[in-house]
Amino acid sequence: MIETEKFKGLNGNLKAFKKEVGDAEKVTFVGIPGVCSPFAELFAHVIRDKESVFMAKTHIETARKIEKTSLGMQFSEDADPHSSVVVLLGGLSMPQYEVDVDDVKKLLGEILEPDGKIIGLCYMGMFKKAGWDELIDFDCIINGVLNGEIYKQD
């Protein structure tokens, strides 16, 4: 894969995601509960005019709708994960979660609609570090870099 654009900050990250989703009507996020799920809710907020689903790891039976509520985006009822855009969240590739890339590829074969799009959404180059960028046929990877400081009183 080659770099095609740069963005700055969280807002740039969200805009890049919205652009890549394009005119798709439905997006399924796949990730690690607790680690990736808040990111799925955040990014689903950006595309709140579309149907969004989250599922844990490669467990289709965990698929839940992500719906707009008065408290923001929330998981709700069971959902069908079949979608024209599948977003793989970076936590999947972290070794401690023991997700087999072959299981992810099998899942993509089951839930990605024909001519669908696979988006990788990660931070700190997780898919590249895990080698998944070479193992999964991503249409694009949106990689954010987090920097930070801590300030305290003297």
Image (tube, rainbow, N blue to C red):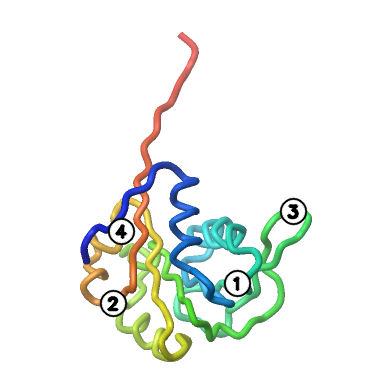
Q: Which of disc 2 and disc 3 is earlier in sequence?
A: 3
Checking the image for residue 136, the label placed there is: 2
- Which residue sits at x=38%, y=62%? 90
Q: Which of disc 2 and disc 1 is earlier in sequence?
A: 1
Residue 9 in percent (x, y) is at 43, 42
The residue that disc 1 covers is: 52
Q: Which of disc 3 and disc 1 is earlier in sequence?
A: 1
Residue 40 in percent (x, y) is at 54, 62
Q: Which of disc 2 and disc 4 is earlier in sequence?
A: 4
Quadrant for residue 73, please give it.
Answer: bottom right
Name the one closer to the observer, 29 or 17: 17
Q: Is residue 1 left or right of residue 73?
A: left
Question: Gap in Å between the C-alphas at discs 1 and 3?
Answer: 16 Å
Quadrant for residue 44, please give it.
Answer: bottom right
Question: Gap in Å between the C-alphas at discs 4 and 3?
Answer: 30 Å
The quadrant in which the N terminus is found is: bottom left
Furthest toward the top, the residue is 154
Furthest toward the front, the residue is 23
Do labels 4 and 2 touch, CB within 8 Å?
no
Residue 49 in percent (x, y) is at 65, 67
